[in-house]
Image (cartoon, rainbow, N blue to C red):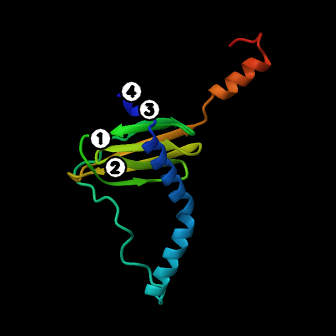
Amino acid sequence: MNGCLTPSPLLRCLFAAGLALAAAGPAGAAAKSKAQAADNPTGAAPLRAEAGPNCKGEAAKPAQLALQVGKSSLMRLPEPVQHRSVGNPLVVQALMVAPDTLYIAGVDVGTTNMIIQGKSGLCSVLDITVAMDPSALQAMLATAMPDEHE
């Protein structure tokens, strides 16, 4: 699994594309909102929200993932992914790099979750915490105060 954590040019490109899409999100949402308003001039609430996972079976206990800002992880799943939904894309980006593999990157400090639905219809929930990498601060402190030890 160590080879999975080494970033390749393809993964870096996919991550950059995902960040670009996330940055364009509000502009795309505004255009979509205008298009929806044109389709619904009365302003009535839509009958159904956008399609999300329609999970089958019992809800599993959420798994935990801890990331650092600017760091990422590959997550291999037991089956191909049908749908994924990130609670707060400003904290985490999740990109498909293979039918059964997600590339998950910490974008900003915070917590969120992600629902992942496999082709079988079963869903799993992933609680994600993104924190700062303390090693840069530790290195600065060690340089500034070389005689101090934990």
Q: Position of residue 27 (x, y in %)?
A: 56, 69
> CB of mark 1 within 8 Å of CB of mark 4?
no
How much space separates mark 2 and mark 1, taking CA atoms? 9 Å
Mark 1 neighbour density, 10 Å: few (under 14) some (14–19) many (20 or more): few
- Disc assigned to residue 6: 3
- Residue for point 36% across, 77% down: 47
* Mark found first going from the N terminus, 1 or 4: 4
Q: Position of residue 32 (x, y in %)?
A: 48, 75
> CB of mark 4 within 8 Å of CB of mark 2?
no
Q: Residue furthest left?
A: 120
> CB of mark 1 within 8 Å of CB of mark 3?
no
- Disc assigned to residue 116: 2
Between disc 1 and disc 3, the foreground one is 3
- Disc assigned to residue 2: 4
Between disc 2 and disc 1, the foreground one is 1
Residue 89 can be seen, yes or no: no
- Residue for point 39% across, 70% down: 49
How much space separates mark 3 and mark 4, taking CA atoms? 7 Å
Q: Quadrant of the N terminus?
A: top left
Mark 2 neighbour density, 10 Å: few (under 14) some (14–19) many (20 or more): many
Number of numbered markers: 4
The three-letter amino acid code for the residue at tag 3 is: Thr
Q: Which residue position holds label 1?
A: 77
Q: Could you tell me which secondary element the residue under label 4 belongs to?
A: helix
The three-letter amino acid code for the residue at tag 4 is: Asn
How much space separates mark 1 and mark 4, taking CA atoms? 16 Å
Q: Could you tell me which secondary element the residue under label 2 belongs to?
A: strand
Q: Nearer the viewer, residue 102 or 110?
A: 102
Q: Residue furthest bottom?
A: 42
Between disc 2 and disc 3, the foreground one is 3
Question: Splitting the image into 4 quarters, where does residue 53 fall?
Answer: bottom left
How much space separates mark 4 and mark 2, taking CA atoms? 23 Å
